[in-house]
Amino acid sequence: MPQGAYAPVLSAFASYRHLPRHIVTFTLAEFCLHLGNAAFFLILNIYMSKNGYADAAIGNYLTGRHFTVMVLAYPAGLLIRQSRILPFLYASATAFPILSFLLVAGVSQGWDMALYPIFALWGAAFFLFEPWRCPICCATALKSGIPKPWR
């Protein structure tokens, strides 16, 4: 068992050794996805500022993304039980980079009114992946057996 000031943190991470490898890999992939998303948004905010957008305008555009996620949360929860997961993941993987490119192009070209729907669609594309990650982990964990420390 680890000793010292970091002992509680290290012991918390040590329990992850008992999880199946595919669940740990999926969790790391999710972490990297969110890290990339956060980096993209920070860089996009700086890029928008350098292109003359005020902080209030940047906040308005980002509100459209967050509002889209809130509006889609309930219907997506209902849809999870009735649909296949893979088409949503493919749609998200296709739409996400295309809409990211459109965001950067829209900012550089000054498409002020087009940025609202692009931000909303970008939020929807990112959200297409989000609600399906937990059922994937649960289904694969049940097939492989839940490790003793996690029962």
Image (cartoon, rainbow, N blue to C red):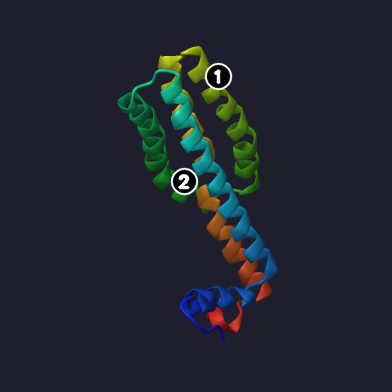
Residue 11 drawn at (x, y percent): 53, 79
The answer to whether residue 129 is visible is: no
Circle 1 residue: 105
Nearer the N terminus, badge 1 or badge 2?
Answer: 2
At 57% from the left and 77% from the top, the residue drawn is: 15
Q: Residue furthest bottom?
A: 1
Circle 2 residue: 76
* Residue toward you, 62 or 126: 62
Up the image or down, 26 lies above or below 51; here it is: below
- The secondary element bearing badge 2 is classed as helix
Residue 143 drawn at (x, y percent): 67, 71
Q: Of the residues tagged 1 and 2, which is closer to the observer?
A: 1
* Residue toward you, 1 or 134: 1
* Residue toward you, 137 or 80: 137
- The secondary element bearing badge 1 is classed as helix
Type of amino acid under label 1: Ala
Question: What is the C-alpha distance between the residues marked 1 and 2?
Answer: 29 Å
Residue 63 drawn at (x, y percent): 35, 33
